[in-house]
Amino acid sequence: MGESVSEATITQWLKKVGDTIAADEAVVEVATDKVDSEVASEYAGIIKEILHPVNAVVGVDAPLALIETDEEVAQYLAPAASPKSITNPVSPTLPKTPEKVLDSPQQYMNQAQAMIKPVNPVVAGQKRFYSPLVKNIAKQENISDQELTTVLGSGKDGRVTKADILAFLKNRNAANKSTLQNTISSTQSNAIPAVALTESSLKKDADEVVSMSRMEQMISNHMVHSLKTAAHVQSFIEIDVTKLWNWREKVKNEFVSQHGVKITFTPIFLHLVAQVLPEFPLLNATLEGTTIIKKKDINLGMATALSDGNLIVPVIKQTNALSLIGLAKKVHELASNARNNTLNPDDVQQGTYTVTNVGMFGSLTGTPIINQPQLAILALGAIRKVPSVLETENGDVIAIRQQMMVSHSYDHRIINGAMGGMFLLRLKQLIENWDESQTI
């Protein structure tokens, strides 16, 4: 999913036309490909017109509503404050010599409609701006540059919005489907029987047809993009976590009473990963084209499951600078905010490496998909009591130990198997040699 945001979808209007609002009062909720946020008004006044309906896709600099105010700046059309979740646009400023004073609500509305009025298609030879989101969709759907110039843009200055390119795809796919059906109809009678399995014939009366949510669509696109981009390969290792397990059992109650949060395995493993990554700087990097960017900061993303079954990845900035106590508190804060849908946009950006705990659901291991544009992701399996062979001075013995499978998915375009495996081996050494005598 990319770091920049150029447009957002209106999900809910919290106010209606005619409502009186105060300055900094939430007016509308919007959603980006990162998080959902509320948009507050910069001014107190009365809402005279709502310029975009629910589910409309708007640019970061587009006005959202028309507000009548008694302040001196009322003659200038001001958007209802751009949400922090999108960008920090420059607020409208007062010209020294305004050409015309807008002194009626109708004039405000006319100017607002003019600002959001679709423009004509780009002319041949004219350079056209495309947002990163539009470019990404075009790349995934194999839309050529020539095709892209034919898409009518409804955004500011004729820019192509997400809604524009999705509408273009819908029409193109419909045309392709029609062509395919005509081709199938013209085949001989001994053709493969599967041609009769159309979308409508596959649906039974008892089947439930459910549309994907906005977040599910974004996650789907992000995962498919990653599989198409990175050469995924995995390494696996089994780690004895008995010493770590026993230490946590000994200190967990005292930790809660002293610091107010539980000491789970997640912050402990994140703490150890942050210690190992500096030894393998290529794992804490991104690949942009043919350029490798090794990140100075270690910003660990922790995959967090939501109550609706979706997934989000909050990012702990400069993880290596945090103590285990500070990390435990940060993990608790971000996980709670994620499940309560109160994350800030900055909480899900600038990640350099991701850790996911598939063992929370009983899975022994997993092969997670890399979170682009990162180069690797670590999956922690379930911790289980298993019989293990231990080497002692008196020979080998079988003992019951706490064991965990850990898998490491990495981009084989840049990271070879030796590096991916050595990272796991180094992590194993730190975990299995955990000092049980240390205190919090």
Image (spheres, rainbow, N blue to C red):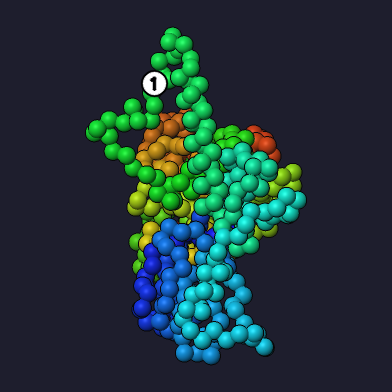
- Height in image: 177 above or below 248? above
What residue do we see at 52% from left, 69% from top?
113
Residue 360 in view (yes/no): no
Q: Quadrant of residue 414?
A: top right
Between 185 and 145, the one lying in front of the other is 185
What residue do we see at 39% from left, 21% from top?
196
Q: Position of residue 130 (x, y in %)?
A: 65, 54
What residue do we see at 43% from left, 20% from top?
195
Between 345 and 142, the one lying in front of the other is 142
Residue 291 in view (yes/no): yes
Q: Residue furthest left?
A: 206
Q: Return the residue at label 1.
A: 196
Q: Position of residue 89 (x, y in %)?
A: 60, 72
Between 56 and 419, the one lying in front of the other is 56
Given the image, on which type of amino acid does mark 1 rest?
Answer: Ala
Q: Position of residue 106 (x, y in %)?
A: 47, 78
Report the number of discs: 1
Between 319 and 347, the one lying in front of the other is 347
In the shown orientation, is residue 326 left or right of residue 425? left
- Height in image: 320 above or below 232? below
Q: For the residue labelled by badge 1, is the local secondary structure a helix, a strand or a loop? A: helix
